[in-house]
């Protein structure tokens, strides 16, 4: 996914009116690619049941306080949480180049998702996470 996400983010730079910090997105993505195991070669597949994909809902539907509560309840380790955050970013980034001119509501939802990711990446919440 590394090359694909970088490509999506490069395409995002060309979209008129996209209010998204692409450099910040790249920073989040690069941090995820530096996590242990990120360089592991695997066969392409799509599997829900992997916590890194399933916790995307934290950034998609919840505010910061809700994400903090969700994280405390699902009890995933730091690396899994950060991989999930990167998946959320990837899902947002892949939406914009394909849907920018045709699906404004979907793009607005994905923009909110990307902003939630960037907010979390900017620093700890008031609860200390």
Image (cartoon, grey):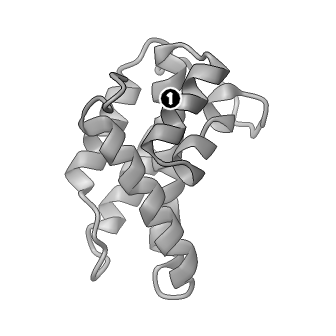
Q: Is residue 58 left or right of residue 12?
A: right
Q: Is residue 16 something one can see in this rendering?
A: yes
Find residue 112 and report its image quarter.
bottom left
**Looking at the picture, how far across and down is residue 47, in whole percent?**
78, 35
> In the image, is residue 108 above or below residue 79?
below
Report the residue at 31% width, 74% height from top: 18
**Looking at the picture, how far across and down is residue 23, in whole percent?**
21, 50
Q: How many marks?
A: 1
> In the image, is residue 71 above or below residue 65?
above
**Looking at the picture, how far across and down is residue 32, in whole percent?**
40, 28
> In the image, is residue 105 above or below residue 54?
below
Report the residue at 31% width, 36% height from top: 121
**Looking at the picture, how far across and down is residue 16, in whole percent?**
28, 82
Of 47 and 125, the residue lying toward us: 125
Q: Is residue 19 left or right of residue 36?
A: left
Of 7 and 59, the residue lying toward us: 59
Report the residue at 70% width, 29% height from top: 43
Q: Is residue 38 left or right of residue 9?
A: right
Find residue 58 and report its image quarter.
top right
| Residue with the mark numbered 1 | 83
Q: Is residue 127 left or right of residue 76?
A: left
Report the residue at 54% width, 17% height from top: 40
Of 112 and 26, the residue lying toward us: 112
Q: Secondary structure at mark 1?
A: helix
> In the image, is residue 85 above or below residue 63?
above
Query: Quarter holding the C terminus?
Result: top left
Mark 1 Cα shell of 10 Å, populated few (<14), some (14-19), many (≥20): many
Q: Is residue 1 something one can see in this rendering?
A: no
């Amino acid at each position: 996914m590394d090359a694909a996400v970088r490509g999506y983010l490069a395409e995002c730079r060309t979209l008129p009116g996209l209010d998204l910090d692409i450099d910040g997105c790249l920073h989040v993505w690069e941090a995820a690619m530096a996590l242990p195991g990120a360089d592991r070669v695997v066969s392409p597949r799509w599997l829900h049941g992997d916590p890194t994909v399933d916790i995307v809902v934290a950034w998609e539907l919840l505010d910061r306080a809700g994400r903090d509560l969700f994280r405390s309840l699902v009890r995933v380790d730091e690396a899994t949480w950060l991989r999930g955050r990167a998946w959320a970013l990837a899902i947002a980034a892949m939406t914009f180049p394909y849907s920018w001119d045709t699906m404004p509501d979907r793009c607005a939802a994905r923009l909110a998702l990307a902003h939630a990711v960037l907010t979390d990446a900017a620093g700890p919440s008031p609860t200390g996470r």
